[in-house]
Image: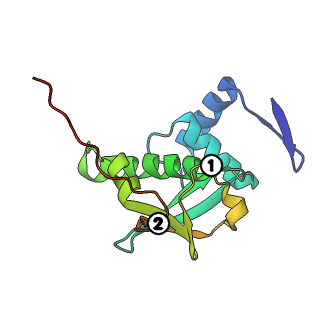
Amino acid sequence: MEEQQEGYYYRRSTSHYAALLSTLAQDPLLLPDVPDSPDLATVDALVSAELGNAMRLSVVRMDASSFDVLVPPTATVRSLKAAITKRINELEEQELGHRHFSWRHVWGSFCLCHGNVKLVGDSTVLRDVGVRDRDQIRFEAHVTSREAGLHSRAKRRRVWR
């Protein structure tokens, strides 16, 4: 598959990626955002961002630290969560070695917010709620109400003997 962007052809093939990875490994000044051991998906996202085909979002944690993630312009909340999960796992592995997070607990306790809008529906398209390139997304405590019907009572557990 080839796309023409500003007079250049950008080929999405394995041989093209291999050549691109070797070029980036030799000259780190081309893309300063490339990590030490990039994979093809990371390089594809960085190239797409350079061509203007991806949104770079700044994610602010609860402790006021932030990091950037790259998502396609048609990304949903689910794909943003996947990008955040991948990025945090990479950051924690670099700093502390292998560490396991319970992402089910994280997404159950916290939600992502853009402005005053909580991004709770996984199928919500980011552009539909006003998220644009270079915007900030932040973590906030996720509070749901019983009136909304999102909480349910605990089921009784029967023990069969």
Q: Which mark is residue 147?
A: 2
- In the rendered structure, the answer to whether residue 55 lies left or right of residue 2 reads left
Locate the N terminus and report the quarter of the image it occupies.
top right
Q: Position of residue 151 (x, y in %)?
A: 39, 57
Q: Answer yes or no: do the residues labelled 2 and 1 have beta carbons within 8 Å?
A: no
Q: What is the distance, in whole Å, between disc 2 and disc 1 at their CAs?
A: 22 Å
Q: Nearer the viewer, mark 2 or mark 1?
A: 2
Please report the residue visible at 14 percent of the width from the left and 31 percent of the height from the top: 159
Q: Position of residue 155 (x, y in %)?
A: 28, 44
**Depicted 100 relative to depicted 151: above or below:** above
Which sits in the foreground, 160 or 9?
160
Locate the C terminus and report the quarter of the image it occupies.
top left
SS category of the residue bearing label 2: loop
Q: Residues within 10 Å of mark 1 (few under 14, many from 20)?
A: few
Which sits in the foreground, 10 or 132?
132
Q: Position of residue 10 (x, y in %)?
A: 78, 38
**Depicted 16 relative to depicted 101: above or below:** above
Q: Position of residue 72 (x, y in %)?
A: 68, 49
Which sits in the foreground, 92 or 13?
92
The earlier-in-sequence mark between 2 and 1 is 1
Three-letter amino acid code at the position of disc 2? Glu
**Residue bearing the label numbered 1:** 123
Please report the residue visible at 54 percent of the width from the left and 56 percent of the height from the top: 69
For the question of whether residue 37 can be seen, the reply is yes
Please report the residue visible at 24 percent of the width from the left and 51 percent of the height from the top: 96
Please report the residue visible at 64 percent of the width from the left and 31 percent of the height from the top: 17
Which sits in the foreground, 37 or 62?
62
The extreme right residue here reads 7
- In the rendered structure, the answer to whether residue 157 lies left or right of residue 89 reads left
